[in-house]
Image (cartoon, helix red, strand yellow):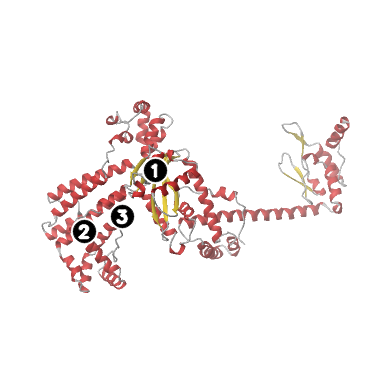
């Protein structure tokens, strides 16, 4: 029995009878049957011959091991069937009605199917491109904080107009295939948000992180918790948006703690990975018993809590004294008198334009905007002559008399100067690489400048206050030097009150581990002291320290000195301000505006807008079935 089967196989492989009825086909089949190549299993692989087209067969797959494919029915046979006898058997059995057709017929049929296949591939390719374009447009809308309906109502018509004029109507019809409906854009933003969230969660699982947290309300009076994290990734310290959660009822410390804890657990994280928390000074955040920071410390005793430096600096700037506050109140009343009345605003603007002034409008002072007071005072001082003339024209003797009072003008100039210095300090405390060490140095430097300015004012030197020193030459002897000296002393006392423990000398070893002054750092374990001694004696690392930024240097020694690396990085991760949360609340105001007050996917919009993790659009497109717009 087995000998019969083996003999039958040998006959089919080597001695197959010719299939087609033409002599050329017979000769080619005999020659082709002998053509084979050896693969790794030492099996014969049959190759395709052009004469097989007369039997309605072409080939597909790997050229080294082709597979016969029937042009008529689309059936694929095994490579072993690449012999005329087997191909003819299939042809006569299933397509006997085509036995009279010539080779030219099958060539035309093959060309027709090739064109259809190319058209199908083009259709699928257009669909995939349209889907990717839909994601990119959705990402752009989220970053620009625009409504989802703009894509369908504005972007699509504009694209069609531009493309039809520049590339023709055919290209415009292709543009129409991009799905940009309101619901589609919403789904795209949700997909990208989840993808970015997944990437960030995976990064945080491998690193410690510090967090800044703040809460505020939106236009519908709903309370939102905003959070950002700072962590180590790709050999550097990075900052990123973490979450924006709505508080359904109260905004107590326990509520904030519960929501963030649930979110951390959902993402496979815990408070044990958190090394620092920066918040504002609200009781719900820093309360000693039930404040958010206190509740976190119960979960992780080593976490460091920081009161935002910016909030403390603003509290310092509010100490003015009665006489200085009266000047600020007068300025606020003047600005409100003009800005709140459209007629006065237009008339004052026309007056400034006629006098060729660079600025023609006043600025409003807002308590929640930290830098507004300095800008308001500077603008009023810049336009003091125009304001005096305008108030004289409308017969407002009280306001016009203020600008005729030399002492009042000197106080105004001093306030504009000192708030300019405070604004400069405020801006310097904001930035992606700002941490406790750099912020503490800047606050200490400002405290020493206050002491220096006080001494110079006592000696009659006012060069550090340029606007005030410019008035001194006009008015003669400065009449408010004692008042200024007292205000500078008050500022210095307030600085010491709100920044009681700014000494960071114990962290000097982080700034420069190779300095002789840092040879014996405090609060080190034995293992940390041993690693620190080895590090100080490593001359290669000493050269690297001069070439790399501080954070990258400490991250680069993780493998050699893990203990000292962890201690240093945990210090550098600490936030000193919550400025990123404040920026995010400004973004939230734009996203959830009066026209979009029913928006539900606030967090997804925020994440796509401000997250530094770009969504993996290629991967998202592969997981979705591409569909063109109808």
- Reading the image, the residue beneath label 3 is 370
Vertical relation: 37 (above or below) 576: above
Q: Residue 616: x and y, percent?
A: 53, 48
Which mark sits nearer the N-terminus, 3 or 1? Answer: 1
**SS category of the residue bearing label 1:** helix
The C terminus - image quarter: bottom right
Of marks 2 and 1, the one in the foreground: 1
- Reading the image, the residue beneath label 2 is 325
Q: Is residue 179 left or right of residue 295?
A: right
Q: Residue 136: x and y, percent?
A: 52, 54
The N terminus - image quarter: top right
Residue at the left extreme, as displayed: 477
Which mark sits nearer the N-terminus, 3 or 2? Answer: 2
- Reading the image, the residue beneath label 1 is 295
Which mark sits nearer the N-terminus, 2 or 1? Answer: 1
Q: Residue 297: x and y, percent?
A: 38, 40
| 10 Å crowding of disc 1: few (<14), some (14-19), many (20+) | many
**SS category of the residue bearing label 3:** loop
What's the distance in space between the residues labelled 2 and 1, CA to CA? 39 Å
């Amino acid at each position: 029995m087995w000998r019969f089967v083996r003999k039958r196989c040998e006959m089919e492989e080597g001695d197959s009878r010719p299939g087609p009825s033409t002599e050329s086909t017979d000769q080619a089949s005999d020659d082709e049957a002998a053509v084979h190549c050896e693969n790794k299993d030492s099996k014969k692989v049959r190759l395709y011959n052009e004469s097989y087209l007369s039997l309605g067969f072409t080939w597909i797959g790997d050229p080294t091991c082709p597979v016969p494919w029937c042009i008529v029915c689309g059936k694929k046979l095994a490579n072993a069937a690449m012999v005329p006898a087997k191909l003819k058997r299939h042809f006569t059995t299933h397509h006997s009605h085509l036995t009279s057709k010539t080779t030219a017929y099958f060539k035309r049929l093959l060309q027709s199917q090739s064109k259809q296949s190319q058209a199908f591939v083009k259709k699928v390719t257009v669909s995939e491109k349209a889907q990717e374009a839909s994601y990119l447009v959705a990402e752009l809308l989220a970053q620009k904080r625009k409504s989802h309906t703009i894509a369908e109502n504005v972007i699509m018509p504009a694209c069609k107009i531009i493309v039809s004029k520049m590339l023709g109507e055919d290209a415009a019809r292709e543009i129409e295939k991009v799905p940009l409906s309101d619901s589609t854009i919403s789904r795209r933003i949700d997909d990208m948000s989840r993808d970015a969230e997944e990437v960030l969660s995976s990064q945080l699982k491998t690193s410690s992180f510090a967090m800044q947290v703040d809460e505020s309300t939106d236009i519908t009076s709903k309370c939102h918790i905003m959070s950002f994290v700072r962590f180590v990734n790709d050999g550097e310290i990075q900052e990123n948006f973490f979450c924006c959660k709505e508080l359904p009822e109260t905004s107590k410390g326990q509520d904030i703690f519960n929501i963030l804890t649930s979110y951390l657990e959902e993402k496979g994280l815990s408070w044990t990975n958190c090394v620092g928390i920066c918040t504002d000074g609200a009781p719900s955040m820093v309360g000693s018993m039930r404040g958010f920071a206190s509740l976190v410390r119960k979960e992780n005793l080593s976490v460091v809590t920081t009161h935002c430096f910016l909030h403390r600096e603003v509290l310092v700037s509010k100490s003015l004294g009665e006489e200085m506050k009266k000047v600020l109140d007068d300025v606020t009343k003047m600005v409100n008198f003009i800005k709140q009345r459209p007629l006065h605003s237009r008339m004052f603007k026309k007056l400034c334009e006629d006098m060729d002034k660079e600025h023609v409008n006043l600025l409003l002072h807002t308590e929640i905007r930290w830098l507004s007071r300095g800008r308001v005072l500077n603008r009023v001082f810049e336009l003091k002559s125009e304001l005096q003339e305008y108030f004289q024209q409308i017969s407002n003797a009280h306001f016009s008399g203020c600008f005729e009072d030399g002492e009042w003008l000197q106080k105004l100039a001093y306030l504009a100067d000192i708030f300019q210095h405070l604004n400069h300090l405020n801006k310097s405390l904001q930035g992606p690489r700002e941490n406790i060490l750099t912020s503490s140095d800047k606050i200490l430097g400002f405290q020493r400048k206050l002491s220096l300015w006080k001494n110079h004012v006592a000696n009659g030197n006012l060069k550090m206050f340029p606007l005030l020193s410019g008035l001194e030459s006009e008015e003669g002897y400065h009449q408010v030097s004692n008042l200024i000296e007292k205000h500078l002393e008050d500022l210095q006392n307030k600085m010491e009150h709100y920044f009681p423990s700014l000494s960071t000398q114990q962290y000097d070893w982080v700034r420069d581990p190779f300095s002789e002054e840092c040879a014996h750092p405090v609060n080190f374990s034995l293992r940390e002291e041993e690693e620190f001694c080895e590090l100080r004696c490593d001359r290669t690392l000493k050269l690297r320290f001069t070439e790399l930024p501080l954070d990258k240097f400490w991250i680069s020694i993780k493998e050699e000195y893990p203990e000292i690396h962890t201690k240093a990085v945990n210090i550098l991760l600490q936030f000193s301000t919550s400025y990123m949360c404040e920026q995010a609340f400004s973004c939230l105001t734009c996203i959830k505006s009066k026209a979009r007050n029913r928006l539900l996917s606030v967090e997804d919009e925020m994440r796509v807008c401000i997250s530094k993790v770009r969504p993996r659009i290629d991967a998202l497109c592969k997981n979705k079935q591409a569909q063109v717009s109808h």
